[in-house]
Image: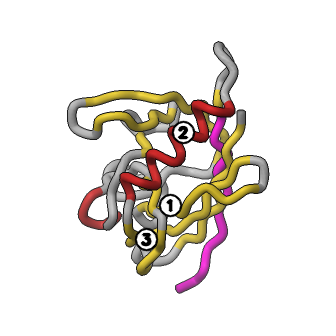
Amino acid sequence: MDLFLHRTHFRAGTNGVLFHRHLFICFTIELPWLANRRGESCIPDGVYEIEPFYSVRFGNHIRLKEVADRTGILIHPANDASKELRGCIAPVTQLTGIGKGLDSRRALEKVLLKMEAARNPGQAVFLTISSEHSGR
């Protein structure tokens, strides 16, 4: 199974659209691109293996494996990238601004359900991230 995230970078944050088989799943929010600086930047474009994960802090969410020069990169709920993210990705049902959105928990549930329904046992799931820069 493959998911595709197409992002647009802005000075104040990054907004994206997540797809599976060319079908819209949800929007995403992240920090701006700041040369992959830990805790300050979104992660680089690339192909990442992802897996369902559980933590006390976020409950059920998704972990990205082997992100260059980073650890602990997750897809977890957040509605304001600048206040709630430190390099992770947050799914949202609606964008309300640059790096801001609504109903993140509901969007994450949708992504997790899509992963569960489309994934075969033992099959790896990959997230392909591509970006463009807005200049704004």
In this rendering, which labeled residue sits more in front, label 3 or label 2? 2
Image quarter of residue 11: bottom left
Residue topped by disc 2: 113
- Name which residue type carries label 2: Leu
Residue topped by disc 3: 13
Image check: 126 left or right of 100?
right
Image check: 85 left or right of 117?
left
Residue at 65% x, 15% y: name it: 121
Mark 1 and mark 3 lie on one chain; the one further toward the N terminus is 3
Mark 1–mark 3 CB contact (< 8 Å): no
Please report the bounds of the magenta region as a residue range: 126-136
- Secondary structure of the residue carrying numbered label 3: loop
Residue topped by disc 1: 28
Q: Residue 39: x percent and y percent?
A: 31, 51
- Name which residue type carries label 1: Thr
Residue at 40% x, 76% y: name it: 12
Q: Residue 34: x percent and y percent?
A: 44, 62
